[in-house]
Amino acid sequence: MLNEGMVDRGIRVLVGVVLLILVFVGPQTPWGWVGVVPLLTGLVGWCPLYSLLGLRTCPLRK
């Protein structure tokens, strides 16, 4: 079940890609691998933290 809206998903994918780029270009810090989390949650459309907190950014289906 999805709990992320399209804008939320787009931002997550963008942030994830930017962080992963930092692993290979720029400061080349291993902290860039944190970008895998927002990238995957944005692609899948489901965030486990949102589920735990009862949050949802996508509209409910009727």
Image (spheres, helix red, strand yellow):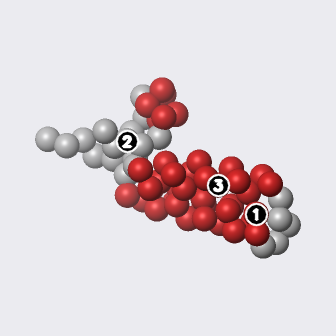
**Which of the 4 image quadrants contains residue 51?**
top left
Chain-order first, disc 3 or disc 1:
1
Reading the image, the residue beneath label 2 is 3
Say which quadrant the C terminus sits in.
top left
Q: Tag 3's secondary structure?
A: helix
Chain-order first, disc 2 or disc 1:
2
The reply to whether callout 2 and callout 1 are in contact (CB within 8 Å) is no
Reading the image, the residue beneath label 1 is 23
Q: Is residue 41 left or right of residue 57?
A: right
Q: CA distance from mark 2 to mark 1?
A: 29 Å
Q: CA distance from mark 3 to mark 1?
A: 9 Å
**Which of the 4 image quadrants contains residue 2?**
top left
Q: Tag 1's secondary structure?
A: helix
Q: Position of residue 48 (x, y in %)?
A: 48, 34
Chain-order first, disc 3 or disc 2:
2
Residue at 83% x, 65% y is 28
- The disc labelled 3 sits on which kind of residue? Gly
- Please tell me how crowded label 2 is: few (under 14), some (14-19), or many (20+) other residues with Cα within 10 Å: many
- The disc labelled 1 sits on which kind of residue? Val
Residue at 46% x, 62% y is 10
Say which quadrant the N terminus sits in.
top left
Q: Is residue 8 visible?
A: no
The reply to whether callout 3 and callout 1 are in contact (CB within 8 Å) is yes
Q: Nearer the viewer, mark 2 or mark 1?
A: 1
Q: Is residue 21 visible?
A: yes
22 relative to 1, above or below: below
Q: Tag 2's secondary structure?
A: loop
Residue at 76% x, 69% y is 24
Q: Position of residue 41 (x, y in %)?
A: 49, 48
Reading the image, the residue beneath label 3 is 35
Q: CA distance from mark 3 to mark 2?
A: 19 Å
**Which of the 4 image quadrants contains residue 7?**
bottom left
